[in-house]
Amino acid sequence: MTKATIVVFSGDLDKALAAFVIASGAAAAGWDVTLFFTFWGINIVRDENKKALEKKDFMSKMFGAMMPKGTEKLKLSKMNMGGMGTSMMKKRMQGKKVKSLREMIKDAKELDVKFLVCDMSMDIMGLKKEEFIDEVDEIVGVGTYLKESKGADLTLFI
Amino acid sequence: MADETLDVRGLTCPAPLVETRKKLKRMEIGQTLEVIGDHGPSKKEVPEMMMEQGQHVVSVTEENGIWYVLIKKSK
């Protein structure tokens, strides 16, 4: 089976969209697709409706509060203009009937895209599995990403 | 007549691909699906990607800027 693995490093809205367009396109073609969320990318899979765990050290709480919590809080990498650019882009996407990032995540899951989250990034940023959206399959290390990528036909770093 | 119809007119990349695949997933093997769309590149890409996925593309036609892709679910 044709296989694709994508490292989702960026937590920028535009880059996350690119990752999900490619992932869902490949999955629609029947490819085996794995997403590996790491560093800023793990903010994409934070669930805005889930509360942070109480027992956290100060730094973890601070990181948690400062980083975007979920797809709605992500910003464009360019032309954000204090949030104006991002909301304009979202309106335009709606007008052009492009799905929102959250909808694309649901579609990707329905087409069996695997969601892996980097354990080390979670540690640094003080995030726990309970704070992620239900689409997340597994918390893994770099070894799993490498194993998945070995023999993959396409591997991207976004 | 196809067993099922999917109208993706007005939708753009990657929705025609994704919606086609989602619809096929819910159908039985042997059933036919007619996808109707107007997104230019998808006229070529929906058949290509569905073939890649192992489906049987019966026909691709176009009329007045609207394309019709007939797919028979084979797997």
Image (spheres, coloured by chain):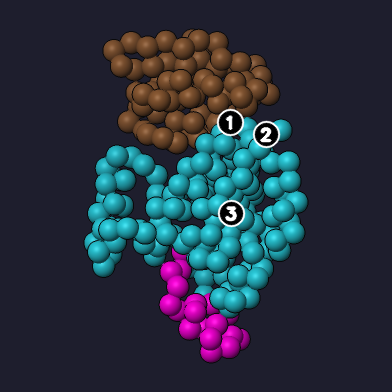
- Give the residue drawn at x 43%, y 77%: A66
Q: Label 3, label 1: how many angstroms apart (C-alpha)?
A: 20 Å
Q: Label 2, label 1: how many angstroms apart (C-alpha)?
A: 9 Å
Mark 1, other Cα within 10 Å: few <14 / some 14–19 / many ≥20: many
Residue with the mark numbered 2: A2
Is A60 on the left-hand or right-hand side of B36? right
Mark earlier in primary sequence (3, 1): 3
Q: Could you tell me residue A150's position as x and y percent? A: 73, 46
Label 2 close to label 1 by CB (< 8 Å) = yes
Q: Could you tell me residue B49's position as x and y percent? A: 55, 26
Q: Which numbered disc, 3 or 1, marks the residue closer to the eye? A: 3
Amino acid type, label 1: Ala
Look at the image and give the residue range highlighted in magenta: A52-70
Residue with the mark numbered 3: A7
- Give the residue drawn at x 33%, y 10%: B63
Residue A93, quarter of picture = top left
- Chain shown cyan: that is A
Q: Colour of chain B?
A: brown
Residue with the mark numbered 1: A29
In the picture shown, does residue A120 fall above or below B57? below
- What chain does mark 1 sit on? A
Q: Label 2, label 3: how many angstroms apart (C-alpha)?
A: 17 Å
Q: Is the same chain shared between marks 2 and 3? A: yes
In the picture shown, does residue B4 fall above or below A147? above
